[in-house]
Image: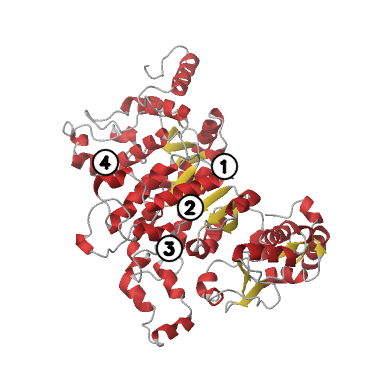
Amino acid sequence: MAATTSGLDTIAQRSKYFFSIALPTGNVLIDSLFLQTRLVATPDVVAILEEFAEPHQIGPWIEAYAARTGGNRKTIAGCVGQLLSQKLLWNLADGDEDTRIAQFAGEYFDRNPLAEGETLRAVGSMSERRRMNLYSLPVPRDVSSFAPLKHAVKLMMIGHCDAEFGLDVLRVAARDRNIDLDVVLGHMEDPQLEEQVAREKPQIVVVTVLTAKYELMAGENVRPGRDALAADTPYVAAVRSALERLRRVTQAPILLHNLQVPVVTPLGRADRGTASHKTRVALTNVQLEALALEFPDVFVVDVEGALALHGKLGLVDDTYGSFQHFGSLRWITQTPESFRRDVHGIAPPWSQLADAFGGGDVAEYDRIVANEQLDILVSALALEPRKCVVVDLDGTLWPGVLAETGSPFALDSPPGHFLEELGAWGYAGLYRGIHEALRALKNRGILLACVSKNDEDVVKKLWRYPKRSDETMLRLEDFDTYRINRDEKVDNILSIAKELNLDPSAIVFVDGNPLERKRVARLLPDVLVIGDNPFAIRWELLTNASLQPATISDDARQRTRKPTEPNRVVKAIALMRKLRAGGEDYGEKG
């Protein structure tokens, strides 16, 4: 959070209750003792903290510091605002810090760590773990990194080690998407969780893996056979209770992690049925999808699918030491060196772990999960949604130039060839896949438009498919509007945006011609331009978060019920052109 106008009157002082660890990189790990705040900072951020060893009023201090250092006032204010939100700077208006921390810690830890005789220290081995590379891998925060971004989102992460370990990776990934993520941690076991959520007022909540996973995987607690399909697994029952708690205090969208399906099982091939080791997790994930529909604005983060897409063998930890932990294999390599005493100082090097299962990037698991979370966050909060796809014709929807080939695809192919496996999935399958993806976007409520530097009459005459071709293939009437002329595509895109009442930032442009892509990207930088690799077009259209509305409106569904019916916009354009041409009919037959 940035220091707001009203916040400039705030009087703040550096908190007493965090410790700093110098890292080999020259940066500093700043870690709160009680508030679960962790920040890898460069020396310039540390210098700002040191400035507040004595209380200062924020506004005058920013002016003086900017004048003294030549720094940008907004960026400095953003840094101070973040330090305030993370309680690394204490707002004196919140009362006496000793009293407030003692009250919080006393309630949370069932003891007062500030009482006489108590030692103020980090708990267990976590302090030592935090010295390891895992916690300094993300890009460190320097003052310039606090420059205002386009979107500011307050997110509450409810979980345990999976939430904490991935926190910094999530923040950095969010900044790459122009999102300034203010993250607050919480625990489902905290009896004060509801009060925390109500106080923090997050814009979005993420619930990672619950401890109920251990109950799910233990013993005979999933019904065998078909009975398992009718009853919540123990994990789903716990998630249902968690969602009910959260919905009593917040209506913010909730992102709910599913579980990674194990890659190994205790009984091997003999482990079968709905209660088997793997299937009980797969069944739980299916039930989580059904459960999400019972609550407003609850979305499942498909952790299992995301990890599987990247290859789970080198990512998940049940290949190492536990059938039920559901964590990252690479986290294990961050075990403190002092733990070697548990094995008499005898241990194989961690490099052999990578040799056995591949990988080696400590944060790869966290990056995969973070990007899956951010994809749903972008959809759920409708951050910069793309509402229209403008697609080129020649070389994109079909091979070659239509005026030269005479048809999108060869008309002399055997009857029904494009309905058969080889025809539909052979060379023509590349284009069929793009057509199918565009039709899928239409069903999501995304507008479709096409542009082409061509003669409109020629395109209309030649745009026909072989007999008994796949109905997936798009026709001109499937597009909400089009521009087929000799004008520049930049001008046509702007014309389409004006007609559809859209900002260029709401448009995706697809073209196989590198010169056209380069020109549009240069003159219309807010337009998302794709098409440099024809084999990637379908994937980009179907998976880009900006083309995935979280819900599909009734209007959008209505629009797509009759996909072959000529669009009213197309009809209106045809009628207008007919009138301008003095009666000659250029329109589609209705």
Under circle 3, the secondary element is helix
Marks 2 and 3 sit apart, C-alpha to C-alpha, by 12 Å
Residue 365 is tagged as 3
Q: Which residue is mark 4?
A: 428
Image coords of residue 328 (percent x, y): 41, 65
Q: Would residue 546 appear left or right of 564 to someone viewing this image?
A: right
Locate residue 396, reporting x and y percent.
37, 41
User: Mark 4 and mark 1: span between their CA atoms?
Assistant: 47 Å
Separation of marks 2 and 4 at Cα, in angstroms: 35 Å
Q: CA distance from mark 2 to mark 1?
A: 18 Å
Identify the amino acid type marked 3: Tyr
From mark 1 to mark 3, how far is it between C-alphas?
29 Å
**Residue displayed at 46% across by 45% down:** 299
Q: Give whichever of discs 2 and 4 has the lower sequence position.
A: 2
Depth check: give the residue in front, 297 or 98. Answer: 98
Q: Position of residue 170 (x, y in %)?
A: 52, 59
Q: Quadrant of the C terminus?
A: top left
Amino acid carrying label 4: it is: Ala
Q: Callout 2, which amino acid?
A: Gln
Residue 473 spot, x, y in % from top left: 31, 33
Compared with 498, 327 (above or below) is below
Q: Quadrant of the N terminus?
A: bottom right
Question: Mark 2 highlights which residue?
Answer: 373
Mark whose residue sits in front, 2 or 1: 1
Q: Is residue 46 left or right of residue 242?
A: right
Q: Secondary structure at mark 2?
A: helix
Q: Earlier in the sequence, mark 2 or mark 1?
A: 1
Residue pictured at 41% horizontal, 33% vertical: 442
Label drawn at residue 110: none
Residue beneath label 1, please?
251
